[in-house]
Amino acid sequence: MGLIKKLPVFAEKVPGGGIVTTSIEQVLNFAQAKSLWYLLFGTACCAIELMCTGASRYDFDRLGMIFRASPRQSDLIIVAGTITKKMAPRLRTLYDQMAEPRYVIAMGGCTIKGGPFYYDSYSVEKGIEHIIPVDIYIPGCPPRPESLLEGCLNLSKQIQKRKLGDWQEK
Amino acid sequence: MAELRTEEFQVNMGPHHPSTHGVCRLLLTLDGEKIIKVEPYIGYLHRAIEKICENRTYPMCIPILDRFEYVTAMSCNYVFSLAAERLAEIEVPERAEYLRVIMLELNRIASHMIFFGTTVMDIGALTPFLYALREREMIMDLFEMTCGQRLTYNYIRIGGVSRDIPKEFIPKCRETIKTIDEKIEEYKRLLNGNPIWKARTIGIGKLSPELAIAYGASGPILRASGVEYDLRRDDPYSIYDRFDYKIPTYQNGDVYDRYMVRLDEMQESCKIVAQALDGLPEGDIRAKVKPNFKPPEGEVYTRIENSRGEMGVHLISDGTNKPFRLKARGGSFAHLQLLPEISKGCLIADLVAIFASFDVILPEVDR
Amino acid sequence: MTKEELKSYLESNYPELTYSESGKYDLLFIVEAQKLVKTCEKLRDDVKLQFNYLGNISGVDTTENYLTVYQIASISNKLRLDIKVILPHDNPSINSVQSVWPAANWYEREIWELYGIEIHNHDNLTRFLLPDDWDQGHPMRKDWDAPDFIRFPQK
């Protein structure tokens, strides 16, 4: 019975049997929120912090987050680093190749509004929100691994509140 | 059996590919698995750092240049400060010089840790990546202690450093370099005898010293090809002449030697840090520099030994408080240019190994 | 060879090089654009100098002229030298030094792309830093401007 106690609050226990009744929505949300596989998409400085977050000390795996090199297998794209005008169409392509439901984390100042390259730069996209829709913004230049972890946890909370019909709207 | 007919075809590797370490696109012309031609296409991270610096005052350029080569941001800080100091003929206090050397060498170790982890991961072993980043975190702690940042430090300023180290830095630093020195021996034990690792690296991507020099290769890549050339000794800057260290040089110029040079270099860096900690004098950490810093007219090209080879800044001053022209030169730019030359005829899997062994990082190429 | 020795050696043996005061740390010499490639070849093949290593080429827009500055070094003799070429502001063009140092390839491509300086005898003069569909000119020029280019606000 220990396992049943660990299940989230939505589960209704049927007395005397190994059966749990719940809604499809909650099961799907629970499964996805706890296994966000992210696309390894690092362009600049934030990619190093993303790497550190994935490695020994901060350990992304304990959130069920595993990196994937292919957009087809990922639920989440963490845009880590500056997006230039030359890179923007590629980012859009990658996003389009991901399967629904998909999520976007904008990591670092550059992806929010161009960061330190807002002024005087002729080649940097000033923010990615007009290329792809963003769910979570993480400020910092680069953000610390802790803030990236918090962003991911927040996304995970958002996903658990999601309704089944929301998928098509986005 | 009749001979099979083969056809050339082209494959795009990148701009988003896990083993290009960033956003570099390689257009491969292949015959089966064999590479006939490689054409690198860069510019996916061209952020116009040089243009931005033309419209910033000298102290404001340093944080921008942090992003020029973020894995060793201390070197970027340093090479720019050195250029400005040479223009304005500023004397840097002793203590600041020692602190700079400590930071530069710690940063070199941190950068080579990234090299070690990612290269070995690209070739197929995941565990060393976790080991290397574990040790790198110890250095990140030291940096956080001194300047509050993990990656982009803005620590070395024109005329000195921004702040002094805290009291607990020295014992912690000694402990760190001692641990790292031991761990590198462990890495060597882990990999150097591994037959798979050896088969994937020995004799792959051979680079002759003549070709390396002609294409402007520098740093570990040049030294792995048997050319003993280190700017710390051969174009001296700072106080490197006071320390006792070796310049690791290997003869074959293949992937394995490039990896060995870097591992040995980390151990030499540990030695330099230990000596610098012993000799650290008391005193000022910053020369008197006006906030509105205006160097006299002139131009200077400074170059230092970075973990990726020669890092240089060409600075032209017109007497105002902004640089008239700043050109940043990174080692990777020259090395990526070399890639098509030495990867002809090898397999795609070997190309990944060669690319990783160059330790190319794309912001340095694109700027 | 010290800096002073190198300076006097170059002044006596290379009449095409003119010493410039503006170089602050390393020696800076000016050469005419037509004589550039020949001089570079001579510097590389000179047994006493052996400038076999090209570190960097920078393009500069001074608003009156264009400059290209070649930062070269000798690995065996441990020497450093800068060579500057002054080009006119209208239709600047220069010969490629690729035949002397193959490393010049990408540096010259960059100068061609960002400054619009024509490079003769270059084998691969194609766009590489800017987007493929870029049509806004040469952004590193001092007078360059574009609609979405935001200058840093001045006090």
Image (tube, coloured by chain):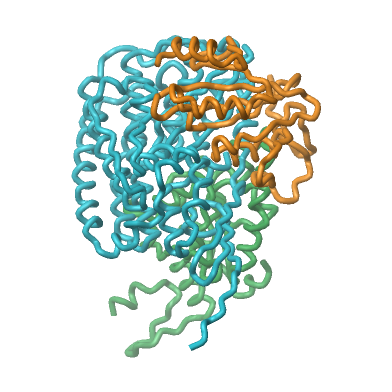
Chain colours: A green, B cyan, C orange
Q: Where is residue A109 in the image (x, y as percent from the top left)?
A: 57, 42
Q: Is residue B224 visible in this depiction of the protein?
A: yes
Q: Quadrant of residue B220?
A: top left
Is C65 left or right of B292, judged from the image as shown?
Answer: right
Residue displayed at 39% across by 53% down: B118
Picture coordinates of residue B300, whole percent (x, y): 53, 19
Residue shown at the point (68%, 19%) measured from the top left: C155
B296 over A67 or under it: above or below:
above
**In the rendering, at what x and y percent does residue B355 appear?**
45, 53
Task: Please name whichever residue, A155 or B295, is drawn nearer the observer in this view of the structure.
Answer: B295
Q: Is residue B344 above or below residue C124?
A: below
- The quarter holding residue B315 reads top right
Which image quadrant is residue C89 in?
A: top right
A148 and A23: which one is in front?
Answer: A148
Q: How far from the left and from the top, in percent, is residue C83? A: 58, 22
Q: Work out whether residue A73 or residue A23 is closer to the camera in this orientation and state it.
A: A73
Residue A53 visible in the current orientation: no
**From the viewer's perspective, is B201 left or right of B344?**
left
- Front residue (pair B254, A103): B254
Q: Quadrant of the C terminus of chain B?
A: top right
Residue at 27 percent across and 14 percent down: it is B282
Q: In this view, does C132 lie above or below B71?
A: below
Q: Which residue is drawn at 52% across and 32% down?
A: C54
Q: How many labels, in total?
A: 0
